[in-house]
Amino acid sequence: MSPALIEVEDLTLSFAGVRALDGVTFSIDEGEFFAVIGPNGAGKSTLFNCVSGIYRPGAGSIRFDGREILGSAPHRIAKAGIARTFQNVDVFPAMTVRECLLLARHQHLRSGPVASMIRWGRSAREERAALRQVTEVAERLGLGDLLGHQVGPLPHGVQKRVELARSLCMEPRLLLLDEPVAGMNHEETARMAATLSEVNTDLGITMLLVEHDMSMVMGISDRVCVLDFGRRIALDTPANVVRDEAVIDAYLGGAL
């Protein structure tokens, strides 16, 4: 078994006396497709915000590749190799798809501002490499023909794929996916699920997924962690989670 890429231990966070996370503990192996589910208000998005550095928990530990990242700034966490998408599409509508994806390459550039302005030497080489990377990712996600299109007018499902592509252009080791199929129809959902599975398998990117579409979650996840009122109530394979009575009572019910 691969070593754990990220270890979350006893994570606790309160808002105005209300426990949003209550001693949450789990680890995710390198290359694993790991899902977190639970009813609204269970603490899923709060967990994501802790891992990505937006929130700072009152107690606990988050180790990424053996190093403590709790308390690190979001941009440092991103530079360490953690990228994320958002529940609500977060793109730059006035940009083209190509420009939006190129933004994600910023942290990999080493040329100074003067060299970048004149596009000479290393700056020119970095720009060509960034364009190649962006084109490859766009082609993988079915966006190759849209690179020159403005993002704003694109359909919701396509904008979701642009956001995913932007995250992949950061070359992350861990990708946090916050409801990647929210607002999509059945066909778009199936296509996104297949894309995420391929990215996980082909590129070896570790996935941490939050999603309400249980058919999708159970179809592509290796393990599932279930939260309820900020506490972990189950952690197992999808097949075992769907039979767990505590999970059925708290969340699944007749959803499957």
Image (tube, rainbow, N blue to C red):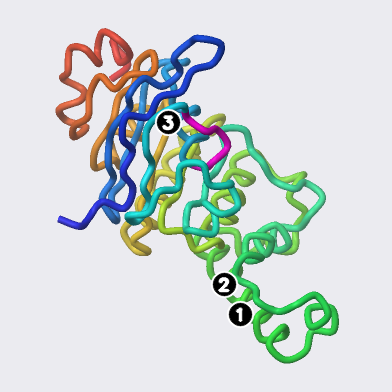
Q: Are marks 1 and 2 in contact (CB under 8 Å)?
A: yes
Kind of residue at badge 1 = Ala
Q: Which residues are magenta?
A: 52-57
Kind of residue at badge 2 = Gln
> Separation of disc 1 and disc 3 at Cα?
34 Å
Please tell me in which quadrant of the rendered image residue 236 appears.
Answer: top left
142 shown above or below 25 = below
Spot occupied by residue 24 in the image (x, y as percentages of width and height) = 33, 27
- At x 48%, y 52%, the residue is 82
Q: Counting other residues with Cα less than 10 Å from the Cα at mark 2, is it few (<14), some (14-19), or many (20 or more)?
A: some
28 shown above or below 132 = above
Q: Which residue is mark 3?
A: 211
197 shown above or below 21 = below
Residue 53 part of the magenta segment: yes
**Helix, strand or loop at mark 1:** helix
Q: Are marks 1 and 3 in contact (CB under 8 Å)?
A: no
Kind of residue at badge 3 = Glu
Per the rendering, the mark at residue 129 is 1
> Separation of disc 3 and disc 2 at Cα?
28 Å
Spot occupied by residue 123 in the image (x, y as percentages of width and height) = 72, 83
Spot occupied by residue 250 in the image (x, y as percentages of width and height) = 30, 10
Q: Which residue is mark 2?
A: 133
For the N terminus, which image quadrant?
bottom left
If you read the primary sequence from the N terminus, does the residue marked by circle 3 or circle 2 appear first? Answer: 2
Report the magenta stretch's main SS: loop
Front residue of 188/113: it is: 113
- At x 26%, y 51%, the residue is 4
